[in-house]
Every structure is written in C-alpha cells, then in structure tokens.
Amino acid sequence: MTRKRALITGISGMVGSHLADFLLENTDWDICGMCRWRSPLGNVDHLLPRANKKDRVSFLYGDLCDYISLQNVIEESRPDYVFHLAAQSYPLTSFSSPLQTLDTNIQGTARLLEALRKSKGSDPVIHVCSSSEVFGRVPKEKLPIGEDCSFHPASPYAISKVGTDLLGKFHAEAYGQKVVVTRMFTHTGPRRGDVFAESTFAKQIAMIEKGLIAPVVKTGNLNSMRTWADVRDAVRAYYMLVTINPVPGEAYNIGGSFSCTVGKMLEHLLSISTRKDIQVETEAARLRPIDADLQVPDTRKFKKHTGWQPQISFEKTMSDLLEYWRARVAAGSNFLTR
C-alpha cells in the first residue's frame, strides 16, 4: 500500500519543523516540505540526513509568490494532506513591509489554493493556517474570543490573515475543496524566531548569562494579555484537525489554557535565569503602532470536535525555550540583539 503524503508549506519555520517531527514519529506518512531556495534550514537540520537518504522526507523548492513553482511542488508531491503554514508571520515587520506581507499571505494563499484546485487527480485535505491576530483589538466584554467574534485586525499582518482566512472558507464553499481553517493563538517553544517577544527575551537572557551583552533585556509592550500554548501541542492539534472528520469550510480557534501578560511571561523567564541582576528597559523600536492586546481564546468548538487538549505546561514551554537559546549561544553562534 502506498503511504500517504503530507505537504508542509513553510517546513523550515518553527511550526513546520515541529509538525514534520510529529508526523514522522506518529504516522507512516511521507513528508514533503516546501521551502524557498534561500530558506534557512537550521530548524530542520536534524532532518537533512533523512532527506539525503530519501527516508520519508523530501524538500521541494517553491515560493508562494510564484505560481509555477507551486504547480511544480504539487505535481511532485501529490499530497493527501496539505498544511499551509508558510507566511510572512511577524506583525511588526508588516508595518514596514505591508505590500510584501499582503502579497505573500493573501495572494500566496490564493495561488496555492488555485494550484491545488486545478491539479488533476488530487483532492487533499487542506489546512489553511490563519491567526488569532484576525480578531485584533477585542473589548473585554467579548472575552474569551469565540469563532464568531468580529474581525478588527490591528496590523497589516492581521489584515493579510483575514484574507487568508476568508480565502480558505471561500474555496471550500465555492469549489468544494476540503479546506479547514485554524486561528491559532500564541504558541511558542524551541525554534521560535527571535523577533517574537518571548523568544527575544529568552535569547537576550541566554546572552546575558554568557556575558555577551549587558544585563538589560530590551522590551516592547509588556501589557498585552496572551494565552500561551506550546508549539508541540499546536502541531498535534493540526494533525487531529485533518484526520478527525475534517469539515470543509469550518474555522477553529486553538490555543492554550494559561493566560498572562507579556510582562508576567518575562518575569517568569527572569525567575529561572541564573542571573539575578537583569534589568528591563522598554525600547521604542519594539513597539507596534497599534497592538492586539487581549488575546484570550474560547477553544471549546475545536476540543469538542477532536478531543484535543493542551498537555504541555506554560512553565515547561518557557524552560525549553530558554534552554534552546542557551544551547544556541553556547554553540558559539553570533546573534543580533533584536
């Protein structure tokens, strides 16, 4: 019997790499990872020997901004499942590069879904990864945020994810494609990019512990409320999404069970540091012009449909994130203090 195939766009990112790990360990599927020729491969370094041996892993070059490359990836991979994770995913960058963000995330998703729709003899289950950022600035009386909460995006990135979200639903309804949409709330852990708050804090702490920078953590807005999930819980949710009675056109909120402000998250990271003299300093360049400051999800719909529950505690997530950066700093790599 031919093994099923999963196509992961954005396999070289934090989520894509952890999803590949999960699928290799928990299924017998072949994993086709789409990345650009210039994509950094650090997050999938451990998978490269398997790819070289053609052991259930392959890397295919594709770009959401190039339709022909997407056609080629789909023709070569012939997927049973598609996890569309690739995106310009950093909200702050979207303020300085809005057009690139909109093209990659909205038109890129449109290109991918069209290429899948027009592919002969292929009808995969497609996971379109939207974002909790679509909800944007939510008043307190609307917490926790349900799937029917109105969209009020607070960045060009969030606007791009509104487009991504609506495209997924449209393709399910208009063309009968098996598209399911997720709005994942804050998720983090090892391999998190250093432009995101908790990861840059952990990186700065690791560099301070090593004596590479002064004992000052630079921060942006510490008052935003977040509900924290572990990336390893997130990818397990994505697997369950496409394998447990996927309903085309449905959208689900997914998120953790522990909520606190970004400031409280930083306090926890500082509490587990070996250095007890670290100061905190707000840096204007790290502040967004407008922020989605109340991100607390209602995840009952997804849990009822799949039985998924988060399993990894906030404390373990943060500890593993800090250990990840300690290992990278100890390896002698150089980093920008961003």
Image (cartoon, grey):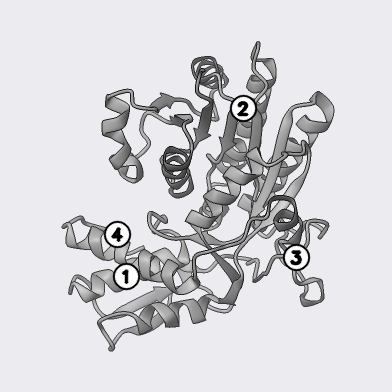
Distance Cα–Cα, label 1 vs label 3: 32 Å
Q: Is residue 277 or residue 234 the one in the foreground?
A: 234
SS at mark 2 in the image: helix
Distance Cα–Cα, label 2 vs label 4: 33 Å
Residue 25: x and y in percent read 42, 42
Judge depth for marks 3 and 2 and give the one in front.
Answer: 3
Which quarter of the figure is the C terminus placed in? Answer: bottom left
> Which residue was labeled with disc 1?
204
> Which residue was labeled with disc 3?
145
Residue 247: x and y in percent read 77, 39
* Amino acid type for the residue under numbered disc 4: Leu
Q: Of label 1 and label 2, which has the lower sequence position? A: 2
Quarter of the figure with residue 194:
bottom left
Q: Is residue 273 left or right of residue 268?
A: left
Q: Of label 1 and label 4, which has the lower sequence position? A: 1
- Using a 10 Å C-alpha cutoff, classify the residue at mark 3 as few (fewer than 14 neighbours), some (14 to 19) or many (20 or more): many
Residue, x 43% and y 60% (percent of image)? Answer: 189
* Amino acid type for the residue under numbered disc 3: Ile
Marks 2/4 in contact by CB < 8 Å: the verdict is no
Marks 1/3 in contact by CB < 8 Å: the verdict is no
Residue, x 54% and y 42% (percent of image)? Answer: 87
> Which residue was labeled with disc 4?
336
The answer to whether residue 215 shows anywhere in this view is yes
The answer to whether residue 224 shows anywhere in this view is no
Q: Is residue 311 or residue 149 the one in the foreground?
A: 311
> Which residue was labeled with disc 2?
112
